[in-house]
Image (cartoon, rainbow, N blue to C red):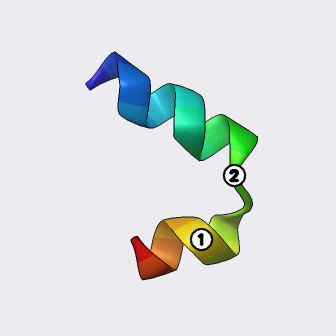
Amino acid sequence: MEMEDSWRLKTPKKLKGEI
C-alpha cells in the first residue's frame, strides 16, 4: 500500500521489523 511506504520511510528500520 502507498501508506505503508510513507510510514516506512518516516519510521526507522527497527519499527519496520517489529511491525
Mark 1: few/some/many CA within 10 Å (<14, 14-19, 20+): few
User: In the image, residue 11 lies at what x, y percent?
Assistant: 69, 52
Q: CA distance from mark 1 to mark 2?
A: 6 Å
Contact, mark 1 vs mark 2 (Cβ under 8 Å): yes
Is 15 situated left or right of 17 in this image? right
- Residue 13 vs 18, above or below: the answer is above
User: What residue appears at the point 55 percent right and 27 percent down from the top-left corner?
Assistant: 6
- Quadrant for the N terminus, please: top left
Q: Which SS class for mark 1?
A: helix
Lateral position of residue 19 relative to residue 9, left or right: left
User: Whole-percent x and y of residue 12?
Assistant: 73, 61
Q: Residue furthest toward the left?
A: 1
Dot 1 corresponds to which residue?
A: 15
- Measured as percent of width and height from the top left, residue 15 is found at 59, 71
Q: Quadrant of residue 4?
A: top left
- Image disc number at residue 1: none
Circle 2 packing at 10 Å, graded few (<14), some (14-19), many (20+), is: few
Residue at 66% of width from left, 77% of height from top? 14
| Residue of label 2 | 11
How many marks can you see? 2
Query: In the image as oriented, which residue stretches furthest toward the top?
Result: 2
- Vertical position of residue 4 compared to residue 16: above or below: above
Q: Amino acid at mark 2?
A: Thr
Provide the secondary structure element on which disc 2 rests: loop
Q: With respect to residue 18, does 6 lie above or below?
A: above
Which residue occupies 36% across, 18% down?
2
Residue type marked 1: Leu
Q: Position of residue 19 (x, y in %)?
A: 39, 70
Q: Quadrant of residue 3?
A: top left
